[in-house]
Image: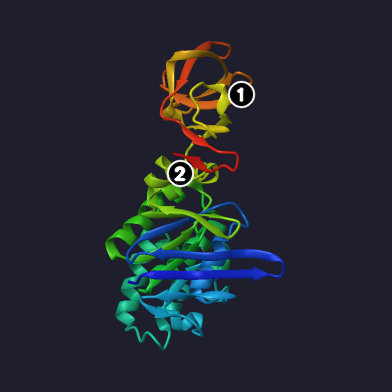
Amino acid sequence: MAEVKLTGISKSFGDDVALDNVDMTVPDGSFVVLLGPTGAGKTTTLRMVSGLDQPDAGDVHIDGSSMAGLTPAQRDVAMVFQQYSLYPHLSVRQNLEFPLRSPMLKTAQSEIDRKVGEVAEILQISHKLDNKATALSGGEMQRVSIGRALVRDPSVYLMDEPLSSLDAKLRADLRIELKSIQSDSGATLLYVTHDQIEAMTMATHVGVLDHGKLVQFGTPRQIYEDPVSVYAASRLGQPRINVLPASVFGGAPSGATQIGLRPEQIIQGEGEDCQVDRVEHLGDQTRLHLTFKAQNIITVTDAHTELRSGDNLKIRPHNPFYFDADGVRIA
């Protein structure tokens, strides 16, 4: 597989800046997830690496070689789009075989059969191999689309929210399978998602994008435990981090205007009184919706709590995050 290096990548579409001087290294054999809301530059980053779009400035290197001037076919990458793109007149088997029949690969039929069979089993579509692509459900089409990338052995896999159209159970199954495939093969994978669970469970590294800028890059644990800003802190964590005025609790450092509290940063049973507004029982945990000094707070507690709406609860912060007026983390 290969390292991917973006150096000074900028891209605009008219007056809209999609990427702004992005420097990022995707280590060889890593599973990198790009996070950020719509318009942050995630898909544009994939298109820069794939060669589907060209940067206005900067360069992309794959395995140490510049990709300047190279077509997508010459870059040895495989891309899975958010919307499945299949050949409707071909069967599932023929769609999966198609990348392997490229004259550039010269793959033997026995190897084609083996790879298609393995991928079909992983994606739970073995029983659909002889169906036409048009006879599949949307979720099945997306699995075939993923499969067309997995049958190859490219330098880099690029995936743009490939699981978003699948049902919850299959999405959970394929998270495990994709991570297993990546780990076992040593593949380099650059993956776009809005799903925090996908990022936390699959990624070796996370890149947080904001209006075309890469604001933080690190392991999921680093982003979660040591965010550089309110924005980065809000990308990971379920429930979402609570961001409150710094003055609601005492002891804020100079310059702090906001305090950030994840559930584990809220000690229950000590401190000041708040009111329980709503209790959500989720099976393995219970989510509490609290009101504290006119501020809304969401935290979690024991699955078998006896707390009810209207109860009082004492809380205090424990090792919280503090942010300045621009949302930058204060050490």
Q: Residue at x 46, y 69 (%)?
A: 6
Vertical position of residue 77 compared to residue 35: above or below: below
- Callout 2 crowding tier (Cα within 10 Å): few <14, some 14–19, many ≥20: many
Q: Is residue 42 left or right of residue 169?
A: right
The three-letter code of the residue at mark 2 reads Pro
* Quarter of the picture holding the C terminus: top left
Q: Residue at x 51, y 64 (%)?
A: 22
Is residue 132 visible in the rendered image? The answer is no
Q: Name the one closer to the observer, 172 or 239.
A: 239
Which residue, given by chain and number where applicable, does mark 1 sit on? 295
Q: Residue at x 57, y 42 (%)?
A: 327
Q: Position of residue 29 (x, y in %)?
A: 32, 64
Q: Most extreme residue toward the front, as rendered?
A: 254
Which residue, given by chain and number where applicable, does mark 2 sit on? 227
Q: Most extreme residue toward the left, as rendered?
A: 184
> Looking at the image, do the residues carrying marks 2 and 1 touch, with CB atoms under 8 Å apart?
no
Q: Residue at x 45, y 56 (%)?
A: 33
Of callouts 2 and 1, the N-terminal one: 2
Vertical position of residue 289 compared to residue 61: above or below: above
Task: Say the numbered circle drawn on residue 329.
Answer: none
Q: Position of residue 191 (x, y in %)?
A: 46, 60
- Give how far apart the Cα atoms at labels 2 and 1 are: 22 Å
